[in-house]
Image: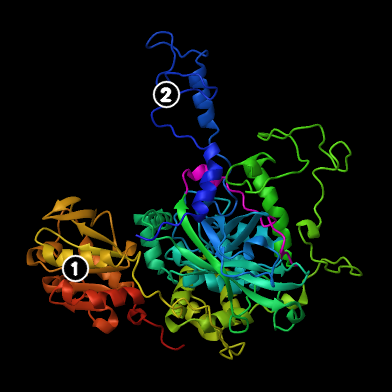
Amino acid sequence: MAKKCGGGQEAIEKRFSAFSIDHKNTQETTSFGTKVDNTNTLKAGCRGPSLMQDFAMREKIMHFDHERIPERVVHARGVGAHGYFETYKDWSDLSAADFLRKPGKKTPVFVRFSTVLGSRGSPDTVRDVRGFATRFYTDEGLFDLVGNVIAPFFVHDAIKFPDIIHSGKPHPSKEIPQAGTAHDTAYDFFGSFPETIHTVLWALSGRGLVKSFRQADGFGVHTFRLINEQGKAVFVKFHWKPLQGLSNLLWDEAQKIAGKNIDFHRTDLYTAIERGDYPEWELGVQIIPEEDEHKFDFDLLDPTKIVPESLVPVTPLGKMTLDRNVENFFAETEQVTFCVANIVRGIGFTNDSLLQGRLFSYVDTQLNRMNSANFMQLPINRPVNAVHNNQRDGYMQSTIHKGDVAYYPNHLQNNAPNIAQPSQGGYMEYPEKINNVAKVREQVPSVEDHYSQAQLYWNSLTPYEQQQTVNGFRFEVGKSVDLGVRKRMIDVLNHVDNGLARRVASAVNVPLPGKVVDNAGKTTVGLSIEERTHPNHIRTKTVAILTAPGTNTKDASAMYDFLKKEGAYVEYVGPALGDQDGLEITQTYTTSSSVLFDAVYVPDGDEAVKLLTTKQSTFPYEEPIMFVLDAFRHCKPVGASGAGVELLKASRVEGSEQDGVLVGQNASALTDAFKKALIKQRYWTRMALDPPM
């Protein structure tokens, strides 16, 4: 088990202790403290009418009727965890922010991962740009870095945000489809507004189907400023880089997982933290001097664009570790109110118009959800430093303000709470000059190139990642009933790459387009998932060992013990739960599937293999065969020893160690090769590629 790290956990637990209640060994009371028997309603006789004087029943039902608050318009479904951030060094040359200047200091954080379009009850594994929101509880106040797992955004102007969301949400007429963009209104908007195409390409690639939030990048999306004590500023793009490596699902896997485990991503994060395998990310920035703002062939303040890492590498600032799950989902994950405007000195905004709109929108939406201006007094939202201002009263005010003064200036309290100048630790506004400009409502010419970075992204993918993207478009555009929608989308793709457009068009009944633009083949590092370095270990990798009565328990145990010692999460799958010849079966062939695992191993055992390759009432649809076949189709490592090879043959699995198909006389002969295969993650050469078009 990983070493227990207290940083964020101790700080947050100390703050929460005053608000936490342990109900063990207690008696039930009403909300006003009177002990009651709250099991049966007070009635006039055993079968008589209920009595209005039953205050306990009235209070219980009333509270139940009001337990829900409005879900978020976007990012409704989420999962959260606590942890801490630790800076690698003193970054005073870059920023006056205290949490970036004290190496060794652990700043508490709370992170909420989310899907954007779906409702609270939607599946985890839908295709989505996903949210990655981090709250830093710094000694100078809250800093909320509210971003996504995809670097660009669909639109550059906040006034278009309602349009992009309305187009992607379920159709108002029937409230379908849920949690996805594979429908007419989404692609009508994408095809009519090509500014979206860069982000659409990211979403339709593996980036839109994360395997685990622990293996997902995070991006601040916007260009921010860092400002040091001397007032010198630089532009920055924020990045989260997972130390667990990157990984993604295939679309077939994502759909099947949604049917087997709707909470797949939540369970993955909770399990890793509970087992002490704390996920870690490096926080880095791309640093652009102010004098270089206009040196690129794109607008630095355009959130639909990225700064290619080949042009500006990411500088790691520090590391974040998530080491504690929430105690209560509603009180913490649901009631946390992230806001882009929660900022600390040393960090500043830019004129990114989408960012400027979010500065208003996030406060407004939290007021709507929480129904009170005092939502910042909730434990999950309170800063760790003291709050002093003249804001008073309102619904659910929990702070008892002393004294009669609630205004500034004043003499009765010597102007307290007094204003704080930057030299006194106050927020540092960047002295940007905005005089002598006219008010206009028009498009910024420097953001009108919608295709160059979409082409850059496409070119930077491996052939197998490109195939996954093509397959994604074939599914999503193919779901559009309207031919005009499909034609417009193919036209947009044709301005990115003719080959891409023709490959998609061939599957959605649209004439193959001719070339309209050249593709110079420009690429950048940092975009391909497959080319990201994989960690040299198999901790938290999930492996299914397929068994049945008659399995060689020595063989199965040898592989199980090896993998578990290496830190993998291993489960025996069998026809029934419980003890099976000394093996503890924790999953069955009907409750589980290979899409929930990173690899599959079949141990020796003639009788077991015979059972697994014949139709049984405990797996009427050849589930063991499909278990192996799906793992192979999804390019995962597949191993077998002794008679277990016969199950591979029955599943039509062929290949060698080079293809991720590992065969040996016994488990001991396979362990090292199986570990290497797990580190590699996927064997994409099994995937069929389109012929040139």
Q: Position of residue 343 (x, y in %)?
A: 69, 57
Expressed as whole percent of the image width and height from the top left, the position of residue 536 reads 37, 75
Q: Is residue 599 visible in this depiction of the protein? A: yes
- Does residue 632 appear left or right of residue 378 in this picture? left
Q: Is residue 457 above or below residue 137?
A: below
Res 194 → quadrant: bottom right
For the point 65% across and 57% down, the residue is: 143
Q: Is residue 412 left or right of residue 204?
A: right
Are there few (<14), some (14-19), or many (20+) residues within 10 Å of tag 1?
Answer: many
Q: Which residue is mark 2?
A: 27
Of the two numbered discs 2 and 1 on the same chain, state the one appearing first in sequence.
2
Magenta residues, start to end = 326-350
Whether residue 177 appears in this view of the structure is no
How many numbered discs, if any?
Answer: 2
Mark 2: amino acid: Gln
Instruction: Residue type at mark 1: give it.
Output: Val
Secondary structure under the numbered disc 1 in the rendered image: strand
Q: Nearer the viewer, residue 128 or 324?
A: 324
Numbered tag placed on residue 586 in the rendering: none
- Disc 1 designates what residue? 602
Name the residue at 48% across, 58% down: 322
Does the magenta run of residues contain 345?
yes
Q: Residue at x 25, y 82 (%)?
A: 657
Q: CA distance from mark 2 to mark 1?
A: 52 Å
Q: Is 563 placed above or below 260 here? A: below
Q: Main secondary structure of the magenta part?
A: loop
At which x and y percent is residue 289? 72, 78
Q: Is residue 601 magenta?
A: no
Q: Is residue 11 left or right of residue 156?
A: left
